[in-house]
Image (tube, rainbow, N blue to C red):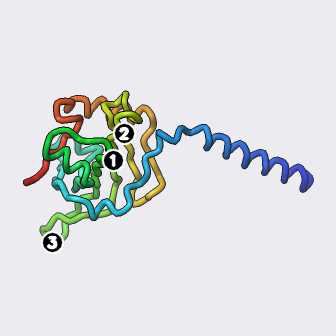
Amino acid sequence: MTIEKKTCLFVSFVMLISSLYLWAKPEDVIAYPAGFRDWNHVRSALIGPASPAYQEYGGLHHIYANKKAMEGYRNGKFPDGSVLIFDLSEAKEHHGTTIEGRRKFIDMMVKDGKRFADTGGWGYERYAGDSQTERVLTAQAKTACYNCHATKKDNDYVFSKLRE
């Protein structure tokens, strides 16, 4: 294969990847919440082996909320701009103390009534481990998130309660 053909194939490949990227709907992208550990801490919990949620959510989790979401915790209606974080780490035993291990993932809920009208106003995302770029939820998984959270419609689709 000549250099020209290799160059042409490479350029064609780059154009194909670029066009696929452009086809992705920007409204589907939920950016990583840089600095979320500086937000309000809502509560923490340890999900152990006796929990039916252990397989996927076993470990130590912390829930964080931005200022808008704190309004929702206080009055029961989360305004647009609310962001909730579910930060899940492995739970490890160390000399009789349960400590955080490696981060498994962070789950996000972002409230935007127009953008996510079909899912109660909430968008869902998951970032793998400590990655700030590796989004891992498929469209089907996001639908499953909504279907689960729909059981909490009376609480604006939010499971957690503010720890006083």
Q: Amino acid at mark 1?
A: Met
Q: Are marks 1 and 2 in contact (CB under 8 Å)?
A: yes
**In front here: 22 or 59?**
22
Q: Which x, y percent locates residue 127?
A: 40, 51
Q: Which x, y percent locates residue 134?
A: 47, 52
In the image, taking residue 2 as reference, residue 10 lies left or right, namely left
Residue 61 visible in the current orientation = no
Q: Quarter-wise, where is residue 139 in the image?
A: top left
Tell me the crowding category of disc 1: few under 14, some 14 to 19, or many 20 or more residues within 10 angstroms, Cα based. many
In the image, taking residue 146 as reference, residue 1 lies left or right, namely right
In the image, taking residue 117 as reference, residue 155 lies left or right, namely left
Q: Amino acid at mark 3?
A: His
| Residue corresponding to mark 3 | 95
Q: Does label 1 or label 3 sit earlier along the sequence?
A: 3
Tell me the crowding category of disc 2: few under 14, some 14 to 19, or many 20 or more residues within 10 angstroms, Cα based. many
Q: Which x, y percent locates residue 61?
A: 23, 54
Q: Does label 3 or label 2 sit earlier along the sequence?
A: 3
Q: Amino acid at mark 2?
A: Gly
Q: Secondary structure at mark 2?
A: strand
At 21% from the left and 30% from the top, the residue drawn is 153
Q: Against 25, is 84 above or below? A: below
Measure the C-alpha gap from mark 1 to mark 2: 8 Å
At 37% from the left and 39% from the top, the residue drawn is 123
Q: Are marks 3 and 2 in contact (CB under 8 Å)?
A: no
**In front here: 150 or 131?**
150
| Residue corresponding to mark 2 | 123
Q: Against 24, is 46 above or below? A: below
Q: Which x, y percent locates residue 74?
A: 13, 46
- Label for residue 108? 1
At 23% from the left and 53% from the top, the residue drawn is 63
